[in-house]
Amino acid sequence: IQRKPQEFKIECLRALRSLFPDQAQPFYAGFGNRETDTISYQAISIPESRIFIINPEGAIHNALNKSMVSSYDGLRELCDLVFPPIDEDKEAADEQFNAYNFWKVDPFAPPRQDPASP
């Protein structure tokens, strides 16, 4: 018996995804308790920034930034920044402009140039 739980999970998630239209992405984030869950969620196109691993003590870390350790309370504080609001009267905003992504700074990115400056 091969110990590859991610293969089973990937197949299950793909089966669920097949219930939606081709262009739909029904999975927004992934939560798991093993690093193999990260592999599973990446296989169905969940960005690493929205994959969270919860250890046995209840500490939560992000798959992209393992040094970011939080708790359920800490995640609740970030909830409105990481997850889109559910409001049937409003259309969801483009994700690249949400507060979480807009204010996120990439330390390796070249500095932004003001288009008006020479």
Image (cartoon, helix red, strand yellow):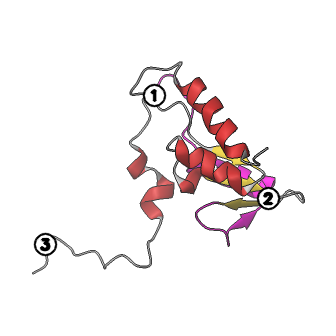
The one nearer the camera, 80 or 54, is 54
Mark 2 residue crowding within 10 angstroms, few (<14) / some (14–19) / many (20+): some
Q: Residue at x 56, y 35 (%)?
A: 27
Q: Which of marks 2 and 3 is in front?
A: 2
Q: Which residue is drawn at 68% across and 45% down?
A: 6
Q: Residue at x 89, y 57 (%)?
A: 56
Q: Quadrant of residue 40 in the image?
A: top right
The residue at which mark 2 appears reads as 71
Q: What stretch is highlighted in magenta?
A: 63-90
Is residue 25 in the magenta section? no
Q: Quadrant of residue 11 in the image?
A: top right
The residue at which mark 3 appears reads as 116
The answer to whether residue 92 is above or below residue 72 is above
Q: Can residue 55 be seen here? A: yes
The residue at which mark 1 appears reads as 90
Is residue 71 in the magenta section? yes
